[in-house]
Image (cartoon, rainbow, N blue to C red):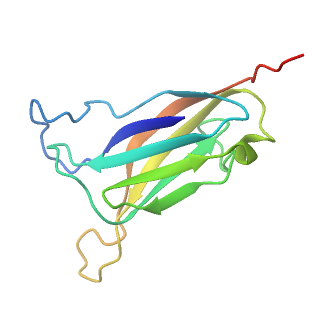
Amino acid sequence: MLLQLTGVLENGALRSEGSGVPYNARQAIAFQLGTSLTVRVRVVTPDGNPVIGGTVKLTVKKRAGDSSPALPAKSAALTPSVDLSITPADTKSLEPGRYAYDIWHQAAETGLGLNDGARNAVVPLSPLWLEPAATLP
């Protein structure tokens, strides 16, 4: 299953009408245990300009306040979108139910100082439902 999301790197800019930038970047996800999910993330500024470079990271936890993730974090370089995949092997030890996820952007270290290594949420904490799989008799 492919899910396409737009993450917003908040930088103080105002959203312009017709830019297609969501006012709330939260997105609920539901998929079935034993299936694959690819989350394609495009990161933009509030005024709709694409963010290129840096790394995007997806983290899933059982509960929002948990200190350890429920499955291995997924990350990749942003060029200008990125695919983050959750495989059946990632979820085989998980129970069906409600989880929480978020997606962060970390700026590249350029050595120029401004925003070097800055880390910002682009999809704030959102619900993820891992649904039970239907099995045949």
Residue at 34% over, 34% down: 25
Residue 48 in view in this figure: yes
Residue 104 percent across, percent down from the top left: 43, 52
Observer-nearest of 70 and 65: 70
Residue at 35% over, 76% down: 109
Q: Is residue 20 above or below residue 43?
A: above
Q: Is residue 45 above or below residue 25?
A: below
Extreme-top residue of the structure:
137
Q: Can you say which quadrant of the picture contains the N terminus?
A: top right
Residue at 25% over, 56% down: 51
Location of residue 129 (image quadrant)? top right
Residue 9 in view in this figure: no
Residue 2 percent across, percent down from the top left: 49, 37
Instruction: Please state if 90 lies on the left or on the right of 75 as rendered.
Output: right
Instruction: Please state if 45 lies on the left or on the right of 67 as rendered.
Output: left
Observer-nearest of 24 and 30: 30
Q: Can you say which quadrant of the picture contains the C terminus?
A: top right
